[in-house]
Image: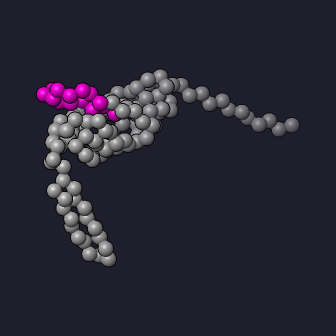
């Protein structure tokens, strides 16, 4: 009779010991920003990452509320920001036990109403046409 070994795998959960790293912040509109980040290193996750929380904290001179969004993805478009406001952006990763440390803050400023300019590049058969909307 052959015996088949059976292995038991146990995942010990804790909060992550590491933080995500913000890799991209792009202003979309006067009230929205796109944020992208990289995963917490596998060895520092301490379990399965269930969600990421993105925090937008206005600078000390702004009289605006904080904005917080949650996602299970590695990027998010955040709406509801105030125009003409500078925010410090951080991201945390969470396991089912709770959140880990915050990422290094990155600063982003939303433009004032009327200051957002769109630049469109159209490439057709190797010819590039620039169209500027002001």
Question: Where on the picture, by quarter, is residue 103?
Answer: top left
Residue sitting nearer the eye, 113 or 111: 113
The span picked out in magenta is 54-67
Q: Quadrant of the N terminus?
A: top right
38 w.r.t. 9: above or below: below
Q: Quadrant of the C terminus?
A: bottom left
Q: Residue at x 24, y 26 (%)?
A: 65
Question: Where on the picture, by quarter, is residue 38?
Answer: top left
31 w.r.t. 94: above or below: below
Q: Position of residue 94 (x, y in %)?
A: 43, 29
Question: Where on the picture, by quarter, is residue 16?
Answer: top left
How many tags in the picture? 0
Q: Residue at x 62, y 30 (%)?
A: 9
Left or right: residue 129 compared with residue 20: left
Q: Residue furthest right?
A: 1
128 w.r.t. 91: above or below: below
Q: Residue at x 20, y 28 (%)?
A: 64
Q: Position of residue 45 (x, y in %)?
A: 45, 32
Q: Position of residue 99 (x, y in %)?
A: 40, 26
Q: Residue at x 39, y 27 (%)?
A: 100
């Amino acid at each position: 009779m052959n015996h088949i070994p059976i292995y038991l795998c146990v995942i010990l959960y804790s909060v992550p010991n590491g933080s995500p790293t913000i890799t991209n912040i792009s202003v979309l509109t006067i009230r929205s920003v796109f944020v992208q980040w990289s995963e917490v290193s596998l060895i520092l996750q301490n379990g399965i990452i269930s969600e990421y929380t993105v925090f937008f904290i206005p600078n000390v001179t702004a009289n605006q509320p904080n904005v917080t969004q949650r996602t299970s993805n590695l990027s998010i478009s955040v709406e509801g920001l105030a125009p003409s406001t500078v925010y410090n952006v951080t991201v945390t990763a969470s396991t089912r036990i709770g959140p880990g440390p915050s990422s290094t803050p990155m600063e982003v400023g939303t433009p004032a109403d009327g200051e957002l300019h769109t630049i469109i590049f159209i490439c057709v058969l190797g010819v590039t046409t620039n169209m500027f909307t002001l």
